[in-house]
Amino acid sequence: MKNLSAFSDEELVLRIQKGDRKCFEYLYDRYQNKLFNFIFRFVGNKELAEDLMHDLFIKVIESNNQFDTNRKFSTWIYALSINLCRNEIRKHSNRKQLIAENLVIENFMNPDQQENIDKNNFKNEVNKYLETLNEENKSLILLRFHEDLSIPQISTIINLPEGTVKSRLFYLLKKIAVKLNAFHPSN
Amino acid sequence: MNNKTPSEIIYELINSKNFDALNHEEKLFVLTEMDKNKYDHIYETQKHLKKTLNEKEFSPDENLKKTLLTEFEKHHESKVYDSGIFKFLYIKIPIYQPIAAAIISLVFLITLYFLNGYSNFNNERIVYKYLTDTLFVQPEISNTRDTFKNNVSNSEEIRTKEKKTSPSNNEKISTEKTIEASLCRSLKKDSNLKQFMVSL
C-alpha cells in the first residue's frame, strides 16, 4: 500500500467514503491547522472555531454524495468553511465582543521586545481591519494571504471571475496599506 | 494584457515584484496609476499581510480529533446497515403509506368479492322446457323407425332450440315438428288405419 502522504486529498476522500479511518485521520492532520486558523480568523473566537471545525469534518465524514471527486478537495472544503462561518456570524450578534476579548489576550502574550510589540500591533490592526470587511472581502483576504491559495482557486471558491478577484484584491490592498500605515513594522 | 483592467495588471505586478524589479514598460504603466512610493508601500503591505496571516498561532483541541474519529466510526458502523438485506429492513417510510396501502387492498378485495358474487348470480341460466306429446302409430313405426330414432336424437337439438327461443316462438316450433312428423298417417288418407281405429 502507498504511503498516506503520497495520496492526494481527493484519493484520501475516496478512501474515507469507503470507511478508511486512517485516511480520515491523515486528512484531518493535513488540514487541521490551516482550517482552524482560517476559521478562527473568520469568526474571531476559539471555541466557536472548534465547533465549526467539528461541523466541517462531520460534513467530510458524511460526504458520500456531496463531494464530487472530480473537484479539488481544498476548493470544496474552503467553500464549505466560508459558508459555515457566514452562517455562524449571522447567528452571533455578540461576535465583535468575543473578538475584542481574543485580541486583548494576544496583546499579553508577547509584550517583551519592541519588535514583537510592533508585530503584534500590526497583527491586531490587521485583525481589527478584517472585522470591518464584509464577508466576501474577508474571504478574499484570508484565502489569498492566509491560505495562500491561487487566484483560480479563489475564483472557484468565491464564485467570482478571476479578473474580479484580482481587482478586488488590489483595491483591498490599497485600503489596507493606507489604514495600517502607522502600524507598519517597517515604519 | 489588453483585455485586463489596470487594477488587474497592477495586482499581478505587485504580487510578483517591487518597483525596481519592473521592466521599463511596466514602470511606465504603473506610473500612469500611482507613484513609485505608493506602489512599494502596497507591495510591502502585501508581504507583511502574508507573513502576519500565515503565522499559525492556534491548533484545535486534541479532543476534537478524538470526537471526530468516534463520529467517523459510528457513521461507518451504521453504514453496514445500509447494505444487503438490512437496506430493505431499515427503509424508513411515512406511516400513512402502509395505512393507505392496507385500505386500498381492503377496498380492492371487498370490491372483488362482491363483483364475483354478482357475476355468479348473472350466470344462472333459466331453462324453459316445453313438453309435447306425439302419437306414433305402430305399423308405421317399423317403417319409420330410423326416422323416429333420428327425431328422438334430434329432440335434444329441438330442446336446445326451445331453450334459446322465447315462449312466443313455441307455435313455430310446433309447426316444424308437425312437418317433421308428417311421416305419420292421417285417418282420412289411410283406410287401414281407419278400420283399425273403428275396430277398437
Image (cartoon, grey):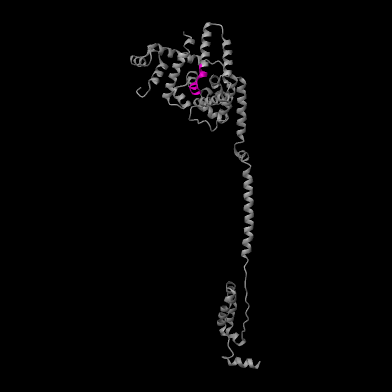
Of B141 and A31, the residue lying toward us: A31
Of B6 and B166, the residue lying toward us: B6
> Is residue A114 among what the camera can see?
yes
Residue lying farthest to the front in this orientation: A93
Of A131 and A51, the residue lying toward us: A131
Quadrant where the N terminus of chain A lies? top right
Q: Where B136 falls versus A114 (above or below)?
A: below
Q: Where A61 falls versus A111 (above or below)?
A: below
> Is residue A8 among what the camera can see?
no
Q: Which quadrant of the structure image shows residue B82?
A: top right
Decide whether residue A123 is among the magenta residues: no
x, y (%) of residue A159? 46, 27
x, y (%) of residue B5? 38, 22
x, y (%) of residue B64? 61, 22
Of B185 and A91, the residue lying toward us: A91
Decide whether residue A137 is among the magenta residues: yes
| Residue at the (45%, 14%) spot, across then down | A178
Q: Where A111 falls versus B70 (above or below)?
A: above
In the image, the segment drawn in magenta is A129-139
Q: Which quadrant of the structure image shows residue B115?
A: bottom right
Would you say B48 lies left or right of B90 here?
left
Q: Which quadrant of the structure image shows residue B62?
A: top right
Count the marks: how many? 0
Q: Where B150 falls versus B88 (above or below)?
A: below
x, y (%) of residue B113? 64, 57
Would you say B90 lies left or right of A169 here?
right
